[in-house]
Amino acid sequence: QEEIHIYGEAREENVEWRFLAQVRILTTINEAHSSLRVVDYDIFEFSNRTKPLILINRDHRLSHIRLEIRYVNQFYEKLPNFVDESQSGDLLLNFDDGKPSLKVHSSLLALYSPLMAKNLEKFQTSDFLHSGQQAELDMKDCDRADFIEVLYQIYSQARPLWADFRRLSRGAVAYQVLPIMERIIKHLIEFDMPIIQKIKEAVKLGVEDAIGELAFTAEKLGIWSYLIGTGFDPKSEFGDDIYHRLICPAILQAKRTPHFARYRSGYKLTYSLENPSEMEMPFVVPLKVSGKTFFVNKGILQLYNDSELATGNNGERYFRINVDLSKYLESKDLTIQQVIEAMLQYMNPQNHRMKIEFVRPVIMIAYEHKMFKLVKEMEQFLVDEPPMTSELLLDQLVFAQKFDLKNVIGQTLLRIEVNFVDVAYNLIETEIFKKHISKDLQNKIMDRIVSGWGQSSWRLADCIPTKKLRRFIEADDGGPISNHDADLVTFNDINSHYAFGEPHDLPVKLEQQQ
């Protein structure tokens, strides 16, 4: 049986990309005598981290196989190249490997790591800033590849935590990069693996808080006592130091506290927009908004692009407020101070939440100031917010068209096919639709109403990709190979080998169907 593997590749290195698409598979035995026929369809995700879609041809008579694809959601982000001359930054990180230094934003590193903040505050003094010297820091506690993985997490929300989990853990632990360490601990605790195996992994990675929390959880669940009763020897498994210094105190704490008690409070960054701490002060810049001053980490603004912000005589920064934004705020009874504060709070690495009423004005501000990273992040909030009436649907399409929100348009077109088709009927009769929606988008909307693929199957109207990637095709039929997909019951499907080694090294049992 012939296999056809369907996948995508980026044309450049160090890219995170993914596409969500409606896919229809058509086949025929002889195109001259019979037309192509749809034999299979579903929603698929293609990315640099998903496995290929595999079509298994069970019919040797097939003369043509055609794939029809309609994109619903697209994401493409090139990861920063920290040695590129075009890379912005005020700090050089030097590694003892003979390779070029990494150029980064010192204030951003100081925000993520109090340990690094202590080493970097000397570069923020007036004397140093006026000296014209280049700020440089020797990185002796981890290697280059480890810390680059940390930087990827700081500079990009697109990079999966498990992309290179071991390197990321080493770099984050070495320099106490708190938000990333908190996510690493959560990943270790929540990962579906026997708890003793997870403790061993935490020991290997040097994530001490995860060791304690896992031991604490094991005792609370009764697992620890059970294992000791079976002859389990924690000293030989984890070593004397880990056992006495971390595990014993955690077990004792679990025994002494109520069942619902927590082992620890999570790491919290110091992030105050109005009263920055003494540690924050060297790394913030005043941002003036209608008479109010916010103190914003300079690295955060640089990450999202502060090149279009105005600068006052004393170094303070300003956003431009255009007429359209002013009218919008007035119509929604919002103030510019509220919107900017919500935007700055969202930029907190441990927040990334936004009330829906602030999303549109933040997009308007970000688009005006070429903060396109922020525009794309805000777009996802609109993608997740369904318009329930024809007025809201039209308003969303006009807004998405104006600010080039392709994923909002893609998701809206998908909704129009089935769930919102009645809403769309009223939409196309309005003057705003005829005057303010481009002809190309009008045609796409009409096409989805009349011939949308989702009208023939609920699967094509969904926005959740299937995990059934092995499909058979014949002249008159097609579909997933089996409801039992081995990838769904192993660690393969989430690429866990990046974090914990290859799946065959793990204690997993599979029941094979005969």
Image (spheres, rainbow, N blue to C red):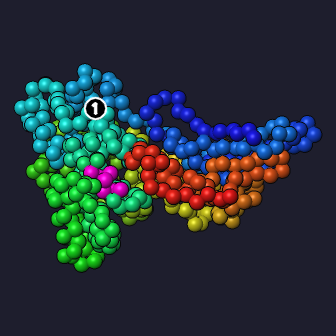
* 16 relative to 131, above or below: below
Q: How many marks?
A: 1
Would residue 297 be visible to someone looking at this image? no
Q: Position of residue 371 (x, y in %)?
A: 38, 42
Residue 121 falls left or right of residue 81: left
x 20%, y 50%: residue: 295
Q: Residue furthest left?
A: 127
x 25%, y 21%: residue: 98
The residue labelled by disc 1 is 144
**Residue 202 lies in the magenta-colored region:** yes
Residue range corresponding to the magenta coloring: 197-203
In terms of depth relative to the viewer, which is nearer, 357 or 259? 259
Where is residue 82, by image quadrant?
Answer: top left
x 45%, y 45%: residue: 502
Residue 195 falls left or right of residue 74: left
Magenta stretch: helix, strand or loop mostly: helix
Would residue 4 be visible to someone looking at this image? yes
In terms of depth relative to the viewer, which is nearer, 464 or 283? 464
Quadrant that contains the C terminus:
bottom right
Q: Answer few, some or many: residues within 10 Å of disc 1's Cα (few below 14, many 20 plus, some between 14 and 19).
A: many
* 155 relative to 418, above or below: above
Residue 299 falls left or right of residue 66: left
x 57%, y 44%: residue: 51
**Residue 372 lies in the magenta-colored region:** no
| Type of the residue with mark 1 | Arg
Q: Position of residue 288 (x, y in %)?
A: 23, 49
Where is residue 316, by image quadrant?
Answer: top left
In terms of depth relative to the viewer, which is nearer, 14 or 259? 259
Q: Position of residue 489 (x, y in %)?
A: 54, 57
* 258 relative to 445, above or below: below
Q: Position of residue 254 (x, y in %)?
A: 23, 71
